[in-house]
Amino acid sequence: MTRVAVIGTGVIGASWTVHFLAQGLDVVASDPAPDAEERLREAVGAHERLTFTADPGEAAAAADFVQENAPERPEVKNALFATLDAAARPEVVLASSSSTLLPSAIARACTRHPERVVVGHPFHPPHLVPLVEVVPGEATAEAAMEAAMAFYTAVGKKPVRLRRELPGHLANRLQAALWREAYALVQSGAASVADVDTAIAYGPGLRWALLGPLATQHLSGGAGGLGHVLAHLGPPTEAIWRDLGEPDMTPEFVADLVAGVEEELDGADPVALTARRDAALRAVLAAKTDLP
Ligand SMILES: NC(=O)c1ccc[n+]([C@@H]2O[C@H](COP(=O)([O-])OP(=O)(O)OC[C@H]3O[C@@H](n4cnc5c(N)ncnc54)[C@H](O)[C@@H]3O)[C@@H](O)[C@H]2O)c1
């Protein structure tokens, strides 16, 4: 596997390009925007293993793996996948970065080989965050799932294989569950935006980042592990579930949330803060190498 086609080179496509080049792969990138090549080369720096074409079919025909990152609009993805499917060799996996579309819907326009279409959903930014969710559609073949898992592993990602497609895949559903209660707590006046962030970032979030929520819970049970935890804390947790809130996302409340974050960040420059966060993220990843 030496050449990847990166189709759509906005926020996510540019970051994938950085990652694939850093992994020693050739990248053939494609994007119809007039200034796309210039923007990409600016983001990536001069690179002899990067080529660019405005024609997505040409990129797909030259690739051993296709990573699509076009706008999140079904009609755009469908037209694009019809082109990619017509051009790519039959065994080449066509992976979409889509956050919200199901692979079955994306593959609908593929008349040749819909069995090689998967969602390969990264987390922003893909050159830093290891997770990729690999999701099969109704027509996806086992061989395509295995090839996608092997590819992402080989290029240093941490792929998770979903057993079936569902809205939001896996991680965004988990985030949505937390956000729902976080917003509800703020709306009810129980906590401020800053309180919510402190509670997670200086509490459970630290351990979740290292081992995930379920293995963390297992370790909190001592010798009895998760079984012991659920035997005594399971029923009270179920009582909390029955009390969880349902925020009403009115424009006024959204404005309150935005104001709450602005107050929390106290004028910090978002670009500088992102850079500091990403530096800390690199250190956390380096510290995790001893963990499963
Ligand atoms: N931004 C995120 O945090 C994030 C995270 C994970 C996945 N994703 C997914 O990645 C994909 C891209 O999102 P983004 O945030 O990079 O969007 P973006 O708007 O930054 O980039 C989209 C790019 O696609 C190009 N484009 C437009 N029409 C096209 C076409 N017909 N063919 C090819 N390229 C075309 C645009 O010129 C633009 O450069 C979406 O499917 C999104 O769901 C986004």
Image (tube, rainbow, N blue to C red):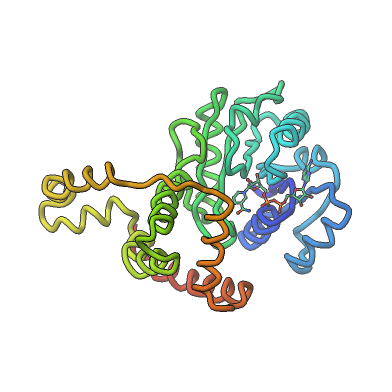
User: Which of the image's four quarters has the C terminus?
Assistant: bottom left
Residue drawn at the location 50% of the way across and 32% of the way down: 165
Residue drawn at the location 56% of the way across and 54% of the way down: 155
Residue furthest top in the image: 111
Is residue 79 placed above or below 51 in the rendered structure? above
Residue 288 in picture, x, y percent from top left: 38, 66
Is residue 226 placed above or below 114 in the rendered structure? below
Choose between 87 and 9: the one closer to the eye: 9
- Does any portion of residue 121 appear in the rendered image? yes
Choose between 144 and 120: the one closer to the eye: 120
Choose between 59 and 128: the one closer to the eye: 128
Rendered image quadrant of residue 194: bottom left
Choose between 191 and 133: the one closer to the eye: 191
For the image, the number of numbered tags is 0
Residue drawn at the location 82% of the way across and 52% of the way down: 52
Residue furthest right in the image: 34
Rendered image quadrant of residue 47: bottom right
- Does any portion of residue 88 appear in the rendered image? no
Rendered image quadrant of residue 59: top right
Residue 54 in picture, x, y percent from top left: 85, 46
Residue 213 in picture, x, y percent from top left: 32, 53
Residue 279 in picture, x, y percent from top left: 53, 74
